[in-house]
Image (cartoon, rainbow, N blue to C red):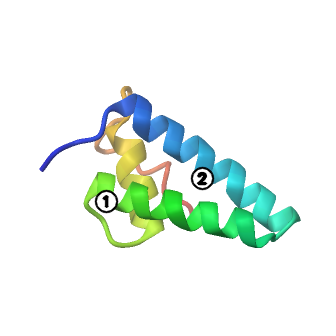
Amino acid sequence: MLMAHPTVLRNLIEQYDTLRILHAEDGSPEVRRRMEDIAYTLCVSTGTRDIDAALIAARHQLPGARPQDDSLVSA
């Protein structure tokens, strides 16, 4: 499987997190559409099928992530 460059993954994660905050505050269709686009890109980039798994996989692929570290998994 091809792996996305860590810089690309970090950028996608940051964009998704920012848009999640904007969506919570604003909820505009444009923000929602952009979130869906980034979620799709993250899923394709990580070989996953849902955004939660994609975010976890992407964070684990970043430099400094430890395979045993589950602190990135939200409750």
- Write down the quadrant of residue 42 in the picture: bottom left
Vertical side of 39 occupied by 59: above or below: above
Residue 23 in the image, given as x and y percentages of width and height: 77, 65
Residue located beneath label 1 in the image: 44
Q: Is residue 72 left or right of residue 63?
A: right
Residue located beneath label 2 in the image: 16
Name the residue located 30 percent from the left edge and 54 percent from the top edge.
46
Question: Residue at the right extreme?
Answer: 25
Q: Nearer the viewer, residue 17 or 28?
A: 28
**SS for tag 2?**
helix
In the drawing, what numbered circle is on residue 14? none
Residue 44 in the image, given as x and y percentages of width and height: 31, 59
Q: Amino acid at mark 2?
A: Tyr
Q: Marks 2 and 1: CB-CB under 8 Å?
A: no
Name the residue located 60 percent from the left edge and 62 percent from the top edge.
35
Name the residue located 70 percent from the left edge and 59 percent from the top edge.
20
Vertical side of 29 occupied by 8: above or below: above
Q: Amino acid at mark 1?
A: Val
**SS for tag 1?**
helix
Residue 24 in the image, given as x and y percentages of width and height: 80, 66
Q: Is residue 28 left or right of residue 68?
A: right
Q: Nearer the viewer, residue 10 or 27?
A: 27
- Disc 2 versus disc 1: distance between alpha carbons? 14 Å
Q: Is residue 2 left or right of residue 75?
A: left
Residue count near mark 1 (Cα–Cα under 10 Å), binned few <14, some 14–19, many ≥20: some
Is residue 75 in sight in this rendering? no
Vertical side of 75 occupied by 68: above or below: above
Residue 47 in the image, given as x and y percentages of width and height: 25, 60
Name the residue located 42 percent from the left edge and 51 percent from the top edge.
70
Residue count near mark 2 (Cα–Cα under 10 Å), binned few <14, some 14–19, many ≥20: many
Q: Earlier in the sequence, mark 2 or mark 1?
A: 2
